[in-house]
Amino acid sequence: MAFEDLKKDLTETDADVRSYLRNSEEYYKLKIFRVLMGMVTTSAQMILVGAIALLALLMLSLAASLVIGEVLDSFYYGFVIVGTIYVFIAAICYLLRDRLNGSLLRKFSKHYFD
């Protein structure tokens, strides 16, 4: 009688363990899908907004270069001045790259570990 009870308990435990493993596998598949989709949608939004902002910046830079060139009576100087401003901005971004990397890491870890 005790042997039958033990056999029944082991069978139930085996079924419970299999059910737990199956549910855990499904949970992790859904979790990975959620994380990946969050990262893909965030990346797509950043690329789209970045592309539009880049086009707007290009047009504004051309306009600023032409205006500065008209004021200085040389379009060449207008483009050089605007280009120099961008070189300074790039240098500042390079110096602050660790802060940028940290904020990106925090943003994507929030999606992954949430």
Image (spheres, helix red, strand yellow):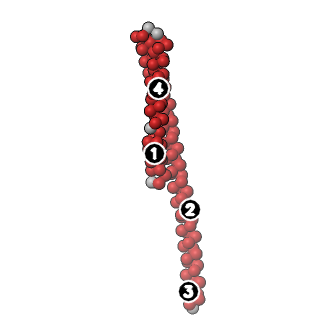
Asked if one can make out residue 54 in the rendered structure from this viewpoint, the answer is yes
Quadrant occupied by the C terminus = bottom left
Which circle's residue, 4 or 3, is located before the other in the chain?
Answer: 3
Q: Amino acid at mark 1?
A: Gly
Q: Residues within 10 Å of mark 1 (few under 14, many from 20)?
A: few
Q: Which residue is mark 2?
A: 25
Q: Residue at x 58, y 70 (%)?
A: 18
Q: Are marks 3 and 1 in contact (CB under 8 Å)?
A: no
Q: Secondary structure at mark 2?
A: helix
Q: Amino acid at mark 2?
A: Glu
Which circle's residue, 1 or 2, is located before the other in the chain?
Answer: 2
Residue 87: percent from the left, percent from the top? Answer: 48, 26
Which circle's residue, 4 or 1, is located before the other in the chain?
Answer: 4
Please tell me whether residue 81 is drawn above or below residue 74 in the rendered image: below
Q: Residue at x 51, y 41 (%)?
A: 43
Residue 35's label in the rendered image is: none
The residue sitting at the top extreme is 73
Residue 86's label in the rendered image is: 4
Q: Is residue 26 left or right of residue 69?
A: right
Which circle's residue, 2 or 3, is located before the other in the chain?
Answer: 3
Q: Secondary structure at mark 4?
A: helix
Camera-near label (3 vs 1) is 1
Q: Are marks 4 and 1 in contact (CB under 8 Å)?
A: no
Q: Which residue is mark 3?
A: 5
Please tell me whether residue 69 is drawn above or below residue 46 in the rendered image: above
